[in-house]
Amino acid sequence: MLYVLAKNPVNNYRRIVRIRKWISVGSAYAVGIRFHITYEAPIDWSKRYIICPNHTSILDITVLTFLCPQEFSFIGKAELLKNPITRLFFQSIDIPVNRDSKISAFKAYKQAEELVKKGKSIVIFPEGKIDDEYPPMLHPFKPGAFRMAEEQQVDILPVVIHNAWKLAWDDGVKLGSKPGVIQVTVLTPISPDHKLEAQFTTIESQVYSKMNKIWKEQPQ
């Protein structure tokens, strides 16, 4: 069914998003993974967002499909096109990017921009990738997500995923995986025209500071 729907992603966008959630969350529950979400403030899910989570585990994708009730697309590494399941999503509703190619990054940005203009939310991992460092930390952000938020006047929704890396760091190959409860904090959305606090020069630095504070304060 997914293969058939993916042939016409424009008309079947909502259905494909729904199937992605069933597969992702259903698989997580089947292997004993649960989610606990803490909200800094109520979220108006009728609005579109540039959703910016930290990235330490392949489980982060499942966290976002569980968390977000609206239609959205991921920007993710082009390597996901090699997987027979994720390929169907990244050939239809999600956006693959080759991190080593400026042309690929530009095309991904423009594709995401078009979806935002159509009222969709976009998930961008602002660190750009899962780093090789273990245990993980919050690495400096790349500017793309924040530039898009400012250009399209879309609120940024920061999300801190605390301990997914303890259940499956990266893809789980090196250290294995285990069941457990993933702790998540959803911060207050930040408007691109929000007045910056005195110590910050960009919205990017302010979002990083807020997320890093929560990351360090909460037990991992």
Image (tube, rainbow, N blue to C red):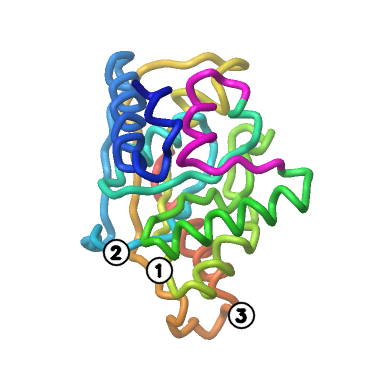
- Residue 26 in picture, x, y percent from top left: 28, 22
- Residue 122 in picture, x, y percent from top left: 45, 53
- Mark 2 is surrounded, within 10 Å at the Cα level, by few (under 14), some (14 to 19) or many (20 or more) other residues, namely few
Q: What whole-number distance in Å separates the C-alpha atoms at marks 3 and 2?
A: 26 Å
Q: Does 193 sit above or below residue 148?
A: below
Q: What whole-number distance in Å separates the C-alpha atoms at marks 1 and 2?
A: 9 Å
- Residue at x-position 45% and y-position 31%: 7
Q: Give residue 74's mark.
A: none
Q: Give residue 155's mark.
A: 1
Q: Nearer the viewer, residue 61 or 166?
A: 61
Identified by mark 1, the residue type is Asp
SS label for mark 1? strand
**Residue tagged 3:** 201
Q: Does 154 sit above or below residue 139?
A: below
In the rendered structure, the answer to whether residue 26 lies left or right of residue 59 reads left
**Residue tagged 2:** 47
Mark 3 vs 2, N-terminal side? 2
Stretch in magenta: 82-98
Rendering quarter of residue 93: top left
Mark 1 vs 2, N-terminal side? 2
